[in-house]
């Protein structure tokens, strides 16, 4: 039994490759990253203390284009997580039909322990030390512990290094720094669009009960859209604990509560519960939108949802997936459910390269079109191969990767 995210990602790769009869040499390219950069960032803290931060960047695969996305600043970062996220990013771009490869990286740090000045210096140092960067090589974006603010610092530093303007070299920037509309809402909005399609297909009623783990960028955006569309968000959790109201939580009011207090706990009209109990609540739709491996062999048999929408990366271990499938619970996989930001990041790069910046309505409409198309293609592949949605998504992605590798003479 393993909760190792890289093993989880490899299990998905091999399962889909076998069912989809993918060329074994194409699969071998995806068993390890093309490049791993691991470096140390020395930094003088505000109090004069010298600290060393572990940093990573993985270019997992670039058969489909320049590598893109995801810098995670968290205290428990390690190479296996970064590698897993790099493979998922590779697959996600292929699932969404984006001409880009998969990259991931970050720094082992809890940003909440840094002053604003330390945070900025760390971000700038990360970009200075990153060996390969630019719109046609590696385009970092935000993930847990990074945001529009950090990406704007990184863009500024990169442009100072290169001595020319290159907005397409960094993703998830604020609009004020040549970013795109909908950047921070892209993943949560995509989660909403895909859930709406899955719910229609499964005949789940429009006022379905939803449980969400994670009330950050992704969980909060999705929760607001679910609430607005008439779904009943009955429970929400964050890193501290969770809250529950069987009649539905007033999500906009909760957003204001969290802005004031930092956490969901103590929100009026709800009862508190642990993050463990949150996942096991009876509901129609469970949306893990926090961290990896939260649905594992230890709790899978107690999950009562009908549908799991994987908003987080790798929230379900392979052991858990087997148990959940046997219980008839449908899983819409991470590489599809949360590919909204991958899609909007590719729009952001296009806007940066052309200096033609789009309206929020245009970005949202194009995101909806692209992600619904990816959902339909995934469903078609899963039906064609009589397999899970995860395998369907991976088979479609692996087929595109294999075809590119073949055309380029890699295999
Ligand atoms: P975030 O940092 O904005 O929010 C994370 C949320 O999860 C917070 O509410 C936090 O309190 C909670 N959380 C953190 N650790 C937890 C734990 N151990 N148990 C329970 N709750 C915990 O992050 P985000 O951007 O919303 O990303 C959430 C997930 O979605 C991650 O898995 C991320 O990789 C994935 N994802 C994010 C994006 C994006 O665009 N932000 C894109 C694709 C995938």
Image (spheres, rainbow, N blue to C red):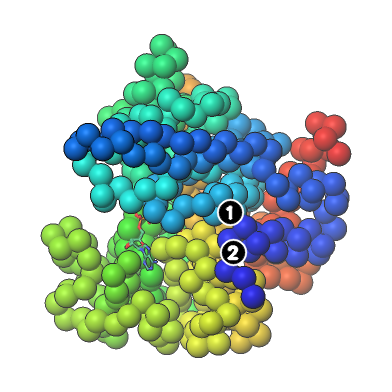
> Residue placed at 86% from the left, 39% from the top?
411
Find the distance from the CA under tag 1 to the CA under tag 2: 7 Å
> Residue placed at 36% from the left, 65% from the top?
214
Mark 1 residue CB less than 8 A from any atom of ligand 1: no
Residue nearer the viewer, 51 or 409? 51
Q: Which residue is mark 2?
A: 4
Classify mark 2: helix, strand or loop: loop
Q: Which residue is mark 1?
A: 80
Residue nearer the viewer, 258 or 378? 258
Mark 2 nearby-residue class (10 Å; few <14, some 14–19, many ≥20): some
Residue nearer the viewer, 357 or 80? 80
Q: Position of residue 235 (x, y in %)?
A: 32, 77
Relative horizontal placement of residue 152, taking residue 46 as reference (left or right): right
> Residue placed at 37% from the left, 16% from the top?
160
Residue 201 appearing in the image: no
Figure quadrant of residue 242: bottom left
Residue 141 appearing in the image: yes
Figure quadrant of residue 80: bottom right
> In the image as oriented, which residue stretches furthest toward the front?
49
> Residue placed at 40% from the left, 80% from the top?
276
Q: Are marks 1 and 2 in contact (CB under 8 Å)?
A: yes
Q: Position of residue 391 (x, y in %)?
A: 70, 64
């Amino acid at each position: 039994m393993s909760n190792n995210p890289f093993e989880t990602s490899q299990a998905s790769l091999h399962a889909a490759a076998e069912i989809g009869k993918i060329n074994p040499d194409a699969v071998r390219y995806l068993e390890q990253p093309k490049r791993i950069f691991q470096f140390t960032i020395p930094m003088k803290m505000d109090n004069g203390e010298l600290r060393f931060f572990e940093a990573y960047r993985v270019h997992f695969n670039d058969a489909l284009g320049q590598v893109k996305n995801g810098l995670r600043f968290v205290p428990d970062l390690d190479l296996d997580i970064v590698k897993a996220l790099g493979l998922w990013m590779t697959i996600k771009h292929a699932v969404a039909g984006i001409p880009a490869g998969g990259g991931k990286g970050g720094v082992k740090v809890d940003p909440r322990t840094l002053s604003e000045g330390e945070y900025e210096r760390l971000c700038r140092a990360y970009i200075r030390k990153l060996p390969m960067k630019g719109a046609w090589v590696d385009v970092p974006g935000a993930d847990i512990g990074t945001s529009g603010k950090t990406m704007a610092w990184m863009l500024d530093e990169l442009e100072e290094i290169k001595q020319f303007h290159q907005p397409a070299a960094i993703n998830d920037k604020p609009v004020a720094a040549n970013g795109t509309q909908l950047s921070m809402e892209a993943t949560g909005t995509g989660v909403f669009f895909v859930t709406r399609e899955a719910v229609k297909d499964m005949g789940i009623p429009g006022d379905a009960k939803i449980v969400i783990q994670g009330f950050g960028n992704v969980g909060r955006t999705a929760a607001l859209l679910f609430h607005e569309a008439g779904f009943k968000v009955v429970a929400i959790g964050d890193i501290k604990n969770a809250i529950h109201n069987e009649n539905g939580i007033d999500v906009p009011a909760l957003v204001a509560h969290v802005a004031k207090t930092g956490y969901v706990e103590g929100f009026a009209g709800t009862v508190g519960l642990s993050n463990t109990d949150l996942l096991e609540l009876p509901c129609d739709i469970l949306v893990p939108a926090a961290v990896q491996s939260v649905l594992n062999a230890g709790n899978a048999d107690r999950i009562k949802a009908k549908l799991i929408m994987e908003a987080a990366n790798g929230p379900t271990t392979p052991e858990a997936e087997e148990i959940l499938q046997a219980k008839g619970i449908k899983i819409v996989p991470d590489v599809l459910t949360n590919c909204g930001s991958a899609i909007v990041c590719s729009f952001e790069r296009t806007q940066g390269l052309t200096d033609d910046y789009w309206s929020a309505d245009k970005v949202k409409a194009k995101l909806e079109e692209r992600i619904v198309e990816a959902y339909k293609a995934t469903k078609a592949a899963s039906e064609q191969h009589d397999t899970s949605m995860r395998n369907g998504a991976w088979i479609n992605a692996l087929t595109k990767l294999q075809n590119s590798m073949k055309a380029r003479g890699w295999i």
